Image (spheres, rainbow, N blue to C red):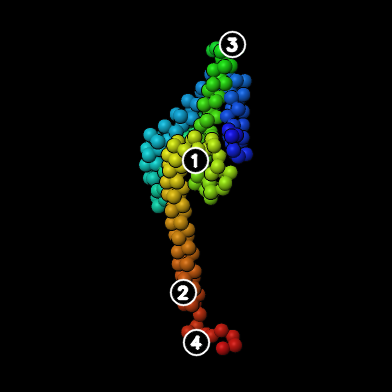
Amino acid sequence: MAVFVTWFDYILVGIICFSFIMGFMKGFIQVLIWIITWCAAITCSVLFANDLTAYFSTFITGYPTLVHWASVLIVFVGVLLLGQLAGMVFGSIALLGRSMSNYLLGGVCGILRGLLLVVIINSIILNTPIANEGWFQNSSIVAYLSVPDAWLAGQLKTIFSQMMNQAMTLGSQAVSSITSGAQGLGSNVSSMLPSNWQLPGK
């Protein structure tokens, strides 16, 4: 019995192997900083996004969900940029030098990073119609990742649902504004015309 059933299994394994190779080449410090940075970005987004949302809400009103997720994105990207800068600094210092242990530990962290990316990819697919495809349903690796995938997919589903509801609300508001404006323009034009005016041909 083959360990990998579908071509999607080979892609996921390829992602993990590629992450291992890159981790081995970059070394332990840079890969560890990458993992810490992503964990810190997610944590800071949860802890501080509400404070930033409250600040932006004093200037932007009527779109609470969009303001909230914009705040989450700002905090997330900001922490990633700081982590990238830290990675460049510590990478140049090379605290562990060019020893083999540095490269091996980098490879181990690279595997962890690859697993994290695979979980994120699978969780995103679970929120799309692609999840019903045979190559995804029959994937042996996806079966092993069912627990973390289900949790993260639920979180993403909540986020997507809130964003779609907000988008529909904005669309309804835009249509209402356009309709009201058109009605107001029609009323103004009607008031400017003579009371006995008729369209030509009537």
Indicate the amino acid at tag 1.
Ser
User: Could you tell which of marks 1 and 2 lies nearer the N-terminus?
Assistant: 1
Foreground residue, 166 or 18? 18
User: Which amino acid is tagged 2?
Assistant: Ser
Q: Is residue 5 left or right of residue 175?
A: right
Task: Give the alpha-carbon distance from disc 4 to disc 1, as whole Å.
Answer: 66 Å
Task: Please identify the quadrant where the C terminus is shown.
Answer: bottom right
Residue 184 drawn at (x, y percent): 46, 70
Q: Which mark is residue 196?
A: 4
How many marks can you see? 4
Tag 3: amino acid = Ser
Q: Which residue is mark 2?
A: 187
Alpha-carbon neighbours of circle 1 within 10 Å: few (<14), some, or many (≥20)? Answer: many
Q: Identify the residue under disc 3.
A: 99
User: Residue 151 bears which disc, if any?
Assistant: none
Image marks 3 and 1: residues in contact by CB distance under 8 Å: no
How far, Cα to Cα, is label 2 from label 4? Answer: 16 Å
Please name which of the two marks, 2 or 4, marks the residue nearer to the observer.
2
Question: Callout 2: few (<14), some (14-19), or many (20+) C-alpha neighbours within 10 Å?
Answer: few
Residue at 57 percent across and 46 percent down: it is 134
